[in-house]
Every structure is written in structure tokens, then in C-alpha cells.
Amino acid sequence: MLFLVISTPHPTRPSEVREYRKQYWDWAQKQLDSGHMQSVYARTGRGGVGIFDVDSNEELHSLLNEWAEIIPAEFEIYPMLNPEAIKSYLNQ
């Protein structure tokens, strides 16, 4: 299951969370290496964007809780279809 996740961190001074931001990127790399994330980007200004590839809503929930433990944030979550799935659907 693919999900686009957009994070908006709680407002703090960037300097106050610098070490947590470093921890986040280490965590994100582990998710990329394990295949739980397909890509991850920082947003200009604040926040991040990731594409998760997980087996269930529960797995995504767990990963987002890990993310929020490092950097508390609100998340926008968008379920996605890969191009092959939508092409298959359109050809029905």
C-alpha cells in the first residue's frame, strides 16, 4: 500500500531541534533501506514528505508514531495507486 505523507512539525525554533532533525534523517534512511519508504524529502522551510510502501494501515501508524517521537508533527496522509494499478483499473 502506497501513502504520501506530508509532515508539519510543531512550531519550535529550528536550532532547538537540530539534534532531533539529525536523528530523523538516520531513521528515514533505515526506512528507505528496509523498503518501508520509497522516497523522502525535506520541505522548504519546515517539514518533510515521504512515500511509504507498507502492508497495512497499522504498519503506517507504527512508523508515523516513530517519526512523531523524533519530531512531533501533524501528518497529512494520502493513499496512492501506482501507475500500473490505475492503468489496469482504466482498462476494465
Image: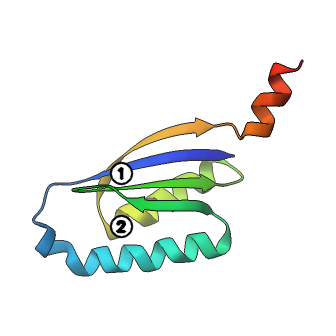
The residue identified by callout 2 is: 69
Q: As drawn, is 20 to the left or to the right of 2? A: left
Q: Amino acid at mark 1?
A: Ser
Q: Nearer the viewer, residue 16 or 83?
A: 83
* 42 relative to 84, above or below: below
Q: Residues within 10 Å of mark 2 (few under 14, many from 20)?
A: few
Q: Residues within 10 Å of mark 1 (few under 14, many from 20)?
A: many
Q: Position of residue 3 (x, y in %)?
A: 58, 45
> Which residue ends up furthest to the right in the rendered image?
92
Quadrant of image for the C terminus: top right
Identify the residue at image location x=63%, y=76%: 33
Q: Amino acid at mark 2?
A: Glu
Q: As drawn, is 33 to the left or to the right of 24? A: right
Number of marks in the rendered image: 2
Identify the residue at image location x=47%, y=75%: 27
* 28 relative to 49, above or below: below
Q: Which of label 2 and label 1 is nearer to you?
A: 1
* 33 relative to 65, above or below: below
Scheme of colours in the image: rainbow
Q: Quadrant of residue 84?
A: top right
Identify the residue at image location x=85%, y=29%: 88
Q: Secondary structure at mark 2?
A: helix
The residue identified by callout 1 is: 7
Q: Secondary structure at mark 1?
A: strand
* 71 relative to 87, above or below: below
Question: CB under 8 Å between callouts 2 and 1?
Answer: no
Identify the residue at image location x=55%, y=53%: 51
Q: Quadrant of residue 19?
A: bottom left
Q: Nearer the viewer, residue 54 or 89?
A: 89
Q: As drawn, is 75 to the left or to the right of 88? A: left
